[in-house]
């Protein structure tokens, strides 16, 4: 992320079927160590290779907080500073592990007027995928976006 403020997205400008601008990165051991430390999720399955293998996993894997953070970033980057997350959920169905190239994506599934004259409702499909497993984490979100003022 460049540190530049995100542009505000307006409900009036959103189109059903539109893809959200996502992001892609390679997961590494260093990032895993930072996440485990920062989140204080010290369960050994997230940092001890032998423990993970003994538990039937191929290797260590990223935790729920990291996953939630990636999808949350997708939403907030796309909405802009005046957007509001109404609902947000996901299912961790497959693992994201060190070395994976991970992409965080989304698509507009629909929009509605809602009951706020200053904001509209947008329903989103969101997901995480990696080059090893395909979609690992499907999810949905409903966000509120401001409407453009008349004449703008």
Image (cartoon, rainbow, N blue to C red):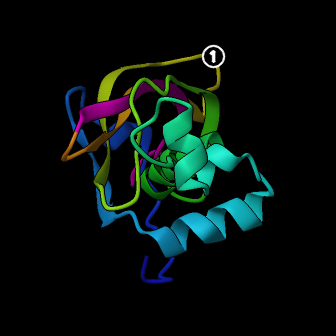
Q: Nearer the viewer, residue 43 or 54?
A: 54
Instruction: Please state the horizontal and vertical placement of residue 147, each as a whole percent of the image.
Output: 49, 40
Report whether residue 141 is seen: yes
Q: Is residue 24 left or right of residue 34?
A: left
Look at the image and say whether residue 8 sits in the magenta stretch.
Answer: no
Q: Quadrant of the N terminus?
A: bottom left
Q: Main secondary structure of the magenta part?
A: strand
x and y percentages locating residue 120 in the rendered image: 51, 29
Q: Give 21 or 67, whichever is nearer the viewer.
A: 67
CA neighbours of label 1 inside 10 A, class few (<14), some (14 to 19), many (20+): few
| Secondary structure under the numbered disc 1 in the rendered image | loop
Task: Please name the residue shown 32% across and 65% down the image.
Answer: 25
Q: Horizontal and vertical percent for residue 135?
A: 27, 31
Please name the residue that numbered disc 1 is placed on: 115
Residue 91 located left or right of residue 46: left
Q: Quadrant of residue 63?
A: top right
Say which of 1 and 39 sits in front: 39
Visible in this render: residue 68?
no
Range of residues picked out in magenta: 133-152
Residue 8: x %, y % from top left: 47, 59
Q: Quadrant of residue 127?
A: top left
Give the residue displayed 49% in from the left and 27% down from the top: 92
Q: Number of numbered discs present? A: 1
Determine whether 3 is above or below 100 in the image. Answer: below
Q: In this picture, is 8 found above or below 58?
A: below
| Residue at the bottom extreme, as displayed | 3
Up-down relation of residue 128 to residue 87 (above or below): below
Q: Residue at x 50, y 49 (%)?
A: 60
Where, quadrant-wise, is the C terminus in this rendering?
bottom left
At a point 24% along the width and 35% down the height, the residue shown is 133
């Amino acid at each position: 992320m460049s540190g530049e403020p995100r542009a505000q997205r307006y409900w009036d400008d959103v189109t059903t079927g539109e893809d959200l601008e996502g992001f892609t990165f390679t997961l590494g051991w260093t990032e895993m160590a930072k996440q485990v430390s920062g989140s204080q999720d010290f369960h050994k399955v997230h940092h001890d290779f032998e423990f993970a293998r003994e538990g039937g996993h191929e290797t260590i894997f990223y935790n729920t907080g990291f996953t939630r953070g990636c999808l949350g970033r997708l939403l907030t980057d796309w909405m802009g500073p005046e957007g509001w997350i109404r609902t947000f959920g996901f299912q961790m169905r497959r693992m994201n592990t060190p070395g994976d190239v991970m992409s965080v994506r989304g698509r507009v599934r629909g929009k509605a007027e809602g009951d706020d004259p200053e904001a509209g409702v947008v329903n989103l499909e969101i997901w995480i995928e990696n080059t090893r497993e395909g979609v690992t984490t499907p999810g949905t979100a409903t966000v509120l976006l401001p409407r453009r003022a008349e004449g703008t």
